[in-house]
Image (spheres, grey):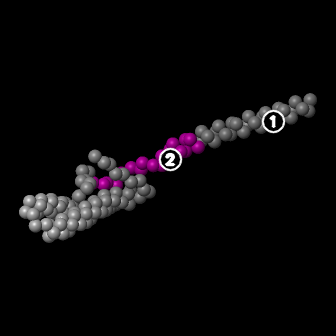
Amino acid sequence: MLTVSIKSLSPIAAKEWATKLIASINEHMRREDVGTSEARIAYLEGKLSETNIAGMQQVFYQLIESETRTVMLANAQPEYVFKTVDPAVAPQEKSEPKRALIVISAVMLGGMLGIFVVFIRAFIKSNKAEEKL
């Protein structure tokens, strides 16, 4: 089981990208497997024409049949590698950024920084007052 998720500013674009990504991977793997199987079939047919031994010809025919079955299955299935259990959907709610958390953190950090600046200024003023005495 594999879950694919894409984050984007546009939920509709993220949905389309996820759908297209899975379709692209399926198509790429299908083309790769069909190409490999067709190359194997061509090689086996070449070897088949070279041999006159009936037993070896039978083995080559079985191997060619197996590779032909792979090509047929690859071309017959629309979802070759990844089978979609739950199709991509655009989210109803925002997931990120959590603006409330950012605002609260900024307010707290600003407050702490402000208090720190007040303490530093008070410390500097008290040192100057002691030096004058």
> On the picture, is 126 further left or further right than 86?
right
* Residue 10 rendering spot, x and y as whole percentages: 41, 58
Secondary structure of the residue carrying tag 2 is helix
Residue at x 77% of width, y 37% of height: 121
Tag shown at residue 99: 2
**Disc 2 crowd, CA 10 A, few/some/many (<14, 14-19, 20+):** few
Q: Quadrant of residue 58?
A: bottom left
Q: Amino acid at mark 2?
A: Arg
Residue at the disc numbered 1: 124
Q: Residue at x 58, y 43 (%)?
A: 106
Residue drawn at point x = 60 percent, y = 39 percent: 108
Q: Nearer the viewer, residue 84 or 125?
A: 84
User: Bounds of the magenta span?
Assistant: 87-106
Position of the C terminus by quadrant? top right
Q: Amino acid at mark 1?
A: Ile
Report if residue 95 lies within the magenta region: yes
